[in-house]
Image (cartoon, rainbow, N blue to C red):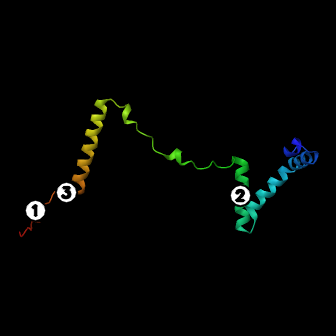
Amino acid sequence: MLGLRRGNTPDYKRCRELCRQHSEQSALGMIDLAANSLDDRVRFMANQWVYEQAWGKPREYDPAEDAPPKLDLLRLSPEQRQELRRLIEFARISRTEISQPEAQGPLSTDSS
């Protein structure tokens, strides 16, 4: 019974061997469909099959790979944390000055 679940039956082995014998012909048929089918959907699916056979399926997207690295502030020395506070405060003040420029006097008109 265990052999049946794993596909170790004589019919399964014959089927695999038959598919292996005709795999080049099948691949050429898919390539022909990808290049020459009049149906966009057929061309798309055939191209996708050819691509996956050539390069493998694309990996699933893992959002954890895009996550920014975590900064462990506890690993910083007290001096480094103080320097970081100073830099953050400097950036905050600089940003405030940029977003709120000093008021300028009235526009001068040159009457000459």
Query: Which residue sits at x=10%, y=62%?
Result: 105
Question: Mark 2 or 3, which is nearer the eye?
Answer: 3
Give the side of residue 24 with respect to residue 84, left or right.
Answer: right
| Residues at circles 1 and 2 in contact by the CB criterion of under 8 Å | no
Circle 1 residues within 10 Å: few <14, some 14–19, many ≥20? few
Q: Residue furthest front?
A: 1
Q: Quadrant of residue 36?
A: bottom right
- Which x, y percent locates residue 44? 70, 62
Q: Toward the viewer: 66 or 81?
A: 81
- Which x, y percent locates residue 77? 33, 29
Query: Which residue sits at x=28%, y=39%?
Result: 85
Which amino acid type is shown beneath numbered disc 2? Answer: Asn
Q: Is residue 94 placed above or below 106 in the rendered structure?
A: above
Q: Toward the viewer: 81 or 102?
A: 81
Q: Is residue 81 placed above or below 38 in the rendered structure?
A: above
Which amino acid type is shown beneath numbered disc 1? Answer: Gly
In what element is the residue under mark 2?
Answer: helix
- Which x, y percent locates residue 30? 78, 57
- Residue 58: mark in rendering: none
CA distance for labels 1 and 2: 67 Å
Which amino acid type is shown beneath numbered disc 3? Answer: Pro
- Residue on which disc 2 sits: 47
- Residue on which disc 3 sits: 101
In what element is the residue under mark 3?
Answer: loop
Give the mark, 2 or 3, whose residue is nearer the N terminus: 2
Circle 3 residues within 10 Å: few <14, some 14–19, many ≥20? few
Q: Residue furthest left?
A: 112
Query: Which residue sits at x=40%, y=36%?
Result: 72
Give the side of residue 4 with respect to residue 101, left or right.
Answer: right
- Residue on which disc 1 sits: 105
For the N terminus, the image quarter is top right
CA distance for labels 3 and 1: 12 Å
